[in-house]
Image (tube, rainbow, N blue to C red):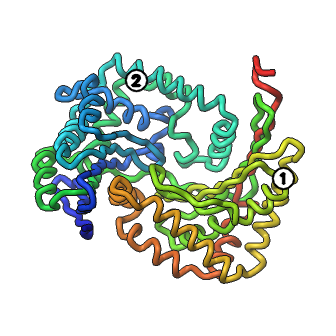
Amino acid sequence: MTSEPCLKLLPNGLAIYLKEIHTAPIISHWVWYRVGSRNEVAGSTGISHWVEHLQFKGTPRFPASQLDKAISRTGGVWNAFTYLDWTTFYETLPASQIDLALDLECDRMTGSLFDPADVESERNVILAELEGNQNEPRFRLGEAVQKTAFDIHPYRNEVIGSREDLKQIQRSHLFAHYQRFYQPANAVIAVAGDFDADEMFARIAGRYTDIPAGPMLTDRVPPEPPLTAERNVEVTGPGSTTYLQLAYRAPTAREPDFFPFTILDSLLGGPTSLNMFGGGGTTNKTSRLYKALVETELAVSVRAGLQATIDPFLYEIAATLRPERTPAQVLAAIDVQISRLQDELIPEAEIARAAKQARAMFAYGSENITNQAFWLGYAEMFSRYSWFTGYIESLAQVTPADVQRVARIYLQPQRRVVGMYLPEGPQEGVP
């Protein structure tokens, strides 16, 4: 019922991944662009996310007032996301209605209007979103930690951008960003579901072949020097809860160390889902940090996470402290667990359990048609689709010595940022 995916390329550079899955009369269609906050410079932070918003404001063929109604009438769903390395748009809908998605995304690649009134309305929407985020202690702490962790790399900036940049970006900047990055050679189309691959390729090629390739995009992102000393950042604000967040420089998804680091993450904080858009999950109650922090009543909760990125990003550990506990106490308990990973060879049984949990999380995020289409394009944003197909095998090759080596290399105090959110009391108007 499911075929192996095939990759086809158009002369203009557009990559097309197709995967037949004949379990239900559904098709999921994704268009991925290699542009995110990684491609932004000082003065334009948040521009990729803003351009994504404007892609929902219509084209001459598909006015904004008709877009949502057209998808809803089919019983389909659609959305878009902007992140560090990419922007993506998707539709999942009945197979008989796939031409609507194909027409819509082809039109949006070249025909988005960027009406000045829409530019200004979305400026206000995004500024309001940013204000809401900055009222959330964990966002404010995460923003401060991320900025402290990088000096020159664009990963230091939040995807939503800064208030100062969002106020000064103009329509001409947005449209130039769109024209530069929304072009066939910078895109991947991924389609999974109930269709014939040859027929689907013909449909897609008929729409995109005549769109000219844009200029070659050179990768000018500056490499970030390594951290050589622990950095500390404190954020204060309203509320009554203290938060602790650690951020260690982590390997890229393409590096061999990513896979033992994935097992390390499962051991230490519980398995991380790399699929941000679906799938279930597994508990982190067997993780070392949960037992050391939550079960001992040092923290209310703890989580950790590793992300798949083009350049080295961050491995983060975050804890919500109990009122009677201090950041120093929780940090000391975390360091004990990290030291154990570095100094004691991990039992094979514990590695096996952590690997099983990581595989389960991966499976949960890969099981339905939408997720299958997601992975066809997502893996291409930081590596190749073969990274996805070889993921389980790569985890199976990890040994206890590999995990210990990675812990010794990456989880050193001089390679991290320690962030604390210290509450000043209840919010105004709240007793």
216 or 166: nearer the eye? 166
Query: Looking at the image, which is closer to me, 202 or 85?
Result: 202
| Image position of 224 (left or right of 102) | right
Asked whether, in this view, residue 294 is left or right of residue 358, the answer is right
Q: Quadrant of the N terminus?
A: bottom left
Res 158 visible: yes
Q: Position of residue 263 (x, y in %)?
A: 60, 70
**Residue 208 marker:** none
Seen at 23% across and 61% down, the residue is 22
Q: At x 42% / y 42%, what residue is drawn? A: 81
Q: Give residue 366's quadrant in the image.
A: bottom left
Q: Nearer the viewer, mark 1 or mark 2?
A: 1
In the shown orientation, is residue 327 left or right of residue 23? right
Using the rendered view, name the quadrant where residue 346 is placed: bottom right
Work out which residue is located at the far right of the displayed protein and give it.
324
Q: Amino acid at mark 2?
A: Gln
Q: Between residues 298 and 121, which one lies in front from this camera angle? A: 298
Relative to 198, is 210 above or below? above
SS class, disc 1: loop
Q: Which residue is mark 2?
A: 170
Query: Which residue is tagged 1?
Result: 298
CA neighbours of label 2 inside 10 A, class few (<14), some (14 to 19), many (20+):
some
Residue visible at 15% across and 47% down?
208
The x and y percentages for residue 394 are 48, 76
Q: Is residue 350 left or right of residue 35?
A: right
Secondary structure under badge 2?
Answer: loop
